[in-house]
Image (cartoon, rainbow, N blue to C red):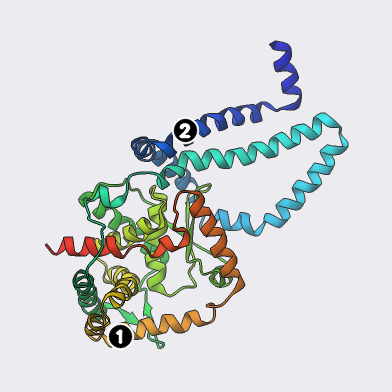
Amino acid sequence: MKKFLSKTREYIPLFSLVVFSLTIISLILYIIILNNVSFADFFNYNLSFPIRVAISWVTVILPFSIAEVALILSPLILIVLILLAFKYGKRGKKASIKYLMVILSILCLVFILYVWTYSSGFHISKIEDKMNLDRGDLTAEELYNASEIIVKELNSLVEYVEFDENGASKMPYSYSEMSEKICKAYESFVDKYPVLRTYYSKIKPIILSEPMTYTHISGIYTFMTGEANVNVNYPDFVIASTSAHEMAHQRGFAREDECNFISFAVLLESDDPFLKYSAYLDVYANIVNALYGESPELYFQVASKLDKRVIGDRQSYSKFFEKYADSKASEVADSMNDSYLQANGQTQGTKSYGMIVEIVTAYLLNKTK
């Protein structure tokens, strides 16, 4: 046995042996997470949460996105890895195998981080069950009532919102201040609905936001760095709702429709008019479009009540997006994201982002009871 271990150490570094052992443990845990909702809930709430917090608190010190910098430097990193492969290849078989083991260890570390920080979020019990919401089929009347609530709130909140010369709503504070306000809103939400655990975190504005917009990605959470990265090229109301969405990922929810809903519900808990306005405006199209599918007559009846300034804000967004609407980058990004989501159990793939009509409507109607 000693001889075997000694021989093994000649080819596999101790670091790699430790990582491979953790990988096996993580794989076993992942299989249990996939097959047991109760265990996924326990794992996500009690074990993943402190790890996510620890990683986020380390990375939040830097004002830029570590994940984005790593992506920008990835070609250089790849070149360095190839050069090192040639270097160790010249040193013989043992050196080459050791180098390959280290590279494999790094890939395994990514898997380990995924399992321990994020994977359970795809397999926990559903948010509607946690909040006792009926996410069933909706009648035209229910959709109309929800649409009317949204229009009424938008018309009320618009009085406190500033607009630029193009009719787009403006965020009246910095991204750092916005992060603080959203964190406070999360605290208020958790006080009412203890379905998640929250902590103080910040969004990371993406440096290459303008070119990223061609992918139609408004934000991305990177579990390896614990960062909520937000595309700040988008209109301000989208930035606000996206920030709350990515923060939901930080707090352990992985399903996109649930993060969209949490973003909406959390922003409504804020005492800031712009954040509330952003929440309602972000879901407006989803709800009224669903209403149109059930009853065009009721749709026009409620849409005609929308304040002209809100209509102008929506038109400004449409004009902004014209530049980025048709792009190959968005097709590639959508295909990759769709595959990623389906591989993690979201059978609807990227369509899941828009699957919030039922739960938002149930939530709004429940609040008015």
Label 1 packing within 10 angstroms: few (<14), some (14-19), many (20+): some
Q: Residue at x 51, y 50 (%)?
A: 343
Sequence order check, earlier mark of 2 and 1: 2
Label 2 packing within 10 angstroms: few (<14), some (14-19), many (20+): some
Count the numbered circles shown.
Answer: 2
Quadrant occupied by the N terminus: top right
Q: Quadrant of residue 120?
A: top left
- Nearer the observer: mark 2 or 1; the answer is 2
Amino acid carrying mark 2 in the image: Leu
Kindly state the secondary structure of the residue where label 1 is placed: helix
Position in image of residue 106 (x %, y %): 64, 40
The residue pinned by badge 2 equals 29
Q: In this rendering, would 319 be left or right of 267?
A: right
Front residue of 162/97: it is 97
Quadrant occupied by the C terminus: bottom left
The residue pinned by badge 1 equals 309
Amino acid carrying mark 1 in the image: Arg
Front residue of 239/325: it is 325
Q: CA distance from mark 2 to mark 1?
A: 52 Å
Q: Is residue 336 above or below residue 103?
A: below
Front residue of 257/81: it is 257
Judged from this view, the residue extending furthest toward the left is 369
> Is residue 250 among what the camera can see?
yes
Q: Residue at x 38, y 50 (%)?
A: 253
Position in image of residue 314 (x %, y %): 37, 81
Residue 209 tag number: none
> Is residue 64 among what the camera can see?
no
